[in-house]
Every structure is written in C-alpha cells, then in structure tokens.
Amino acid sequence: MALTRPSWGQKSAWRIYNLADGLPESACVSVTAAQGKVVVSHFRQPFISELDGYGINLVPAPENAVGRVYESPGGQLWTVTREGLAEFEEGAWVVKPVPEIASAFRGALPRSIDPIPLLPARQGVVIFLLPDKLMEFNSDDPEHPPRIRILRSSLAGMDGTISSAARRWSYQTCANALQMVSFRESQPGCAAV
C-alpha cells in the first residue's frame, strides 16, 4: 500500500507499508478501515491484508469477489459477489445468496472497484446499496435463514455511501438529496440538499 511521501519541508506521521513489510505486493486495488484495522485488497495477489499497526495478517481473497472487502464492528469480513454477499467464516469465504444483488449484476452496474457499497452494521447484519434501493441482509440468528429487507426504495440515482465513525448513521448521496439511516432505529429519512 503506497502512500504519498511528504515533501522536503514536511514532517509526516504516515507509515508506508509495502512488500518489504510483509504485504503480498505493494499495489492495492482497494483500502477500507474499521475497528482499528486497515483492510487491503491487492491487484495481482490472491490475498486480503489486514494491518493493525503492529503486524499484517493475510487472508485468502475470495475467488469471485467484485468489490471491496469490509470489516464489521465484530471483526467479520464481508464482500460482494455476483451471487450475493460473501462472509469470511472459519478460514473460508462462504457465499450468502442475495437475489437482489444477483439481479443487479445481470443489469447495468457501473464498472468500478465498488459497484455495490456495503456497510457491515453489526454481527451478521450488512446494509448494502443497490442502484435503486437501500437493503439489509440479516443473518444474526443462526436458528433461522437470513432475512433480506428493503430499508428504502425509489432511490434512483444513488451513487455513494458514507458511514459515520460511530457506525450509528449512514448517509447516502444521490442526485438532489441526502439519505440518512439510523441503524438503531432502522427508520430512514431524507432531506433535500
């Protein structure tokens, strides 16, 4: 993971990690941060690197992932596949089918590093943003099959997700509105920008 070095007159607290520090390669495709860790997806190597400031933990990359890898507050790793979501469980990636995600990939998703943004909200709960709706995947009860529900529909033109540091709120930007969702209440509201 390469970060810009400071210019001659600057001092910086940035730490640069690369191949010499234990990364499988210096180039990265995506970087996410949560719970004091930085999660890096690499360009050519089939690994996800977790940096905690002391060391680097390598996790095998999912074979069919199409987006960034995110970490939940409980330490779960999640990513998007063409069939749904994938969770890293006991050393292996397990695909959780989500018909709405599979359908979105059959349509015209933008070609980007993160075609379907995720927000792992808590253990077993992932919020994801499709082009026209905000949805929740909930597998927190092992006794029952996962539940998938729409949190907000008719969000045509949605183009991004920004979550709060405390993970209490998520804001999504769209053409002329800002969508705010409370994870505690699961009651979305929208305000014009």
Image (cartoon, helix red, strand yellow):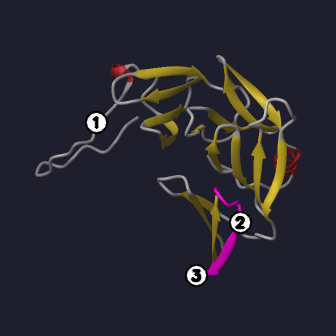
User: Residue 31: x percent and y percent?
Assistant: 49, 41
The residue labelled by disc 1 is 15
Q: Amino acid at mark 3?
A: Val
Looking at the image, residue 28 sits to the left or right of residue 1; the answer is right
Furthest toward the top, the residue is 91
Q: Amino acid at mark 2?
A: Gln
Residue 189 in the magenta stretch? The answer is yes
Q: Locate residue 190: give its quadrant.
A: bottom right
Q: Are marks 2 and 3 in contact (CB under 8 Å)?
A: no
Q: Locate residue 107: give its quadrant.
A: bottom right
Q: Is residue 181 shown above or below 84?
A: below
Dot 1 or dot 3: first in sequence order is: 1
Which SS class for mark 3? loop
Looking at the image, residue 108 sits to the left or right of residue 112; the answer is right
Of circles 2 and 3, the one toward us is 2
The residue labelled by disc 3 is 193
Q: Name the residue nearer the viewer: 183 or 38.
A: 183
Looking at the image, residue 149 sits to the left or right of residue 72; the answer is right
What span is in magenta? 183-193
The residue labelled by disc 2 is 187
For the N terminus, the quadrant is top left
